[in-house]
Amino acid sequence: MIDLERLNDKAAGIAAYIEYDDIPINKNEVLRYSGISATAIAGMNSGKNDMIEALIKRCEACGKNCEFSFDPEAISKAHCPDDADYEGIDRLYEETAGLLREKLTYRLVYRQIRLDADESDLSVLEYFRSSKKLMKNLSGCKEAVIFAATIGAGIDMLIRRYERVEPARGLMLQAFGAERVESLCDRFNDEINEAAKKAGLNTRPRYSPGYGDLKLEVQPLMLELLNAEKRLGITLNESLLMTPSKSVTAIIGIERP
């Protein structure tokens, strides 16, 4: 159980390890990451005819005098192209999900830090000052939670196997990887938010290196503070990209009102 009141304890400066047994898959997010249009996703979820009917009702309720045809056939051609293979997409999704069974892990290390200095008097905040957006995000925060999360290297091996011989499946695997690691981060973020609320604290939206103006140059420091190579097997290449590829580092500001 995450306890954000332990910041003043010595143990609070030690990276803690979490492993989740399973995290529910958000199918719509997987399809979105794979490049499937929102219209196609809606068609898969509700059926083509139901989707057309919903579009008609929405436009009828709008009240604007648009030049728009309410002819179902015209809507079908505009929003539900005949060559959209809904069954094929769904089959590819299910088959790819089957490939990933027993291949993924949901592991994470986190550490609560002071933003002015850590136990070694290292001014952690200095490493983030190059990002104006992050500094705005952390404004008023004296503490933060940093974390690294990964779903392991198993999916990387599958991606390499399929991306050349079966590009569509390789793309779907990439989409699963993006959704899985983001869902892992969301799960942890929700637990941090819950712990903060219980302790009477506020949290800020998580922020990751490579996002906005936060450069990847902060990656080595974050992984070092978390001992992520030893705890999670995460390493960096010369471009400061992580291996396993479906890994994320982030910082969540903690504000004490």
Image: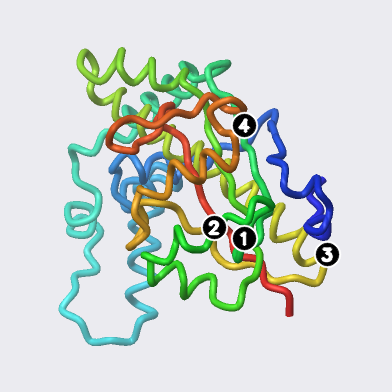
Name the residue carrying label 3.
198
Reading the image, the residue beneath label 2 is: 124
The one of 170 and 44 positioned closer to us in this rendering:
170
Q: Which of the 4 image quarters holds residue 93?
A: top left
Dot 3 or dot 2, earlier in sequence = 2
Q: Quadrant of the N terminus?
A: top right
Amino acid type, callout 4: Arg
Q: Nearer the viewer, mark 2 or mark 4?
A: 2
Q: Compute the Cα span from label 2 to label 4.
A: 24 Å
* Spatial separation of the CA atoms under disc 4 and disc 1: 27 Å
Residue in the picture at 47% in, 63% down = 126
- State how far apart marks 3 and 4 are (Cα): 24 Å
**Mark 4 or mark 1: whose residue is earlier in sequence:** 4
Quadrant in the picture for residue 130:
bottom left
Note whether 150 is above or below 196 in the view shown: above
The alpha-carbon separation of the residues under discs 3 and 2 comes to: 26 Å
Q: Residue at x 37, y 27 (%)?
A: 173
According to the picture, the residue beneath numbered tag 1 turns out to be: 117
Q: Are marks 2 and 1 in contact (CB under 8 Å)?
A: yes
Colour theme: rainbow
**x and y, in percent, of residue 223 in the image:** 51, 39
Task: Tell me if residue 116 comes above or below residue 33 in the rendering.
Answer: below
- Look at label 3 and name its amino acid: Lys
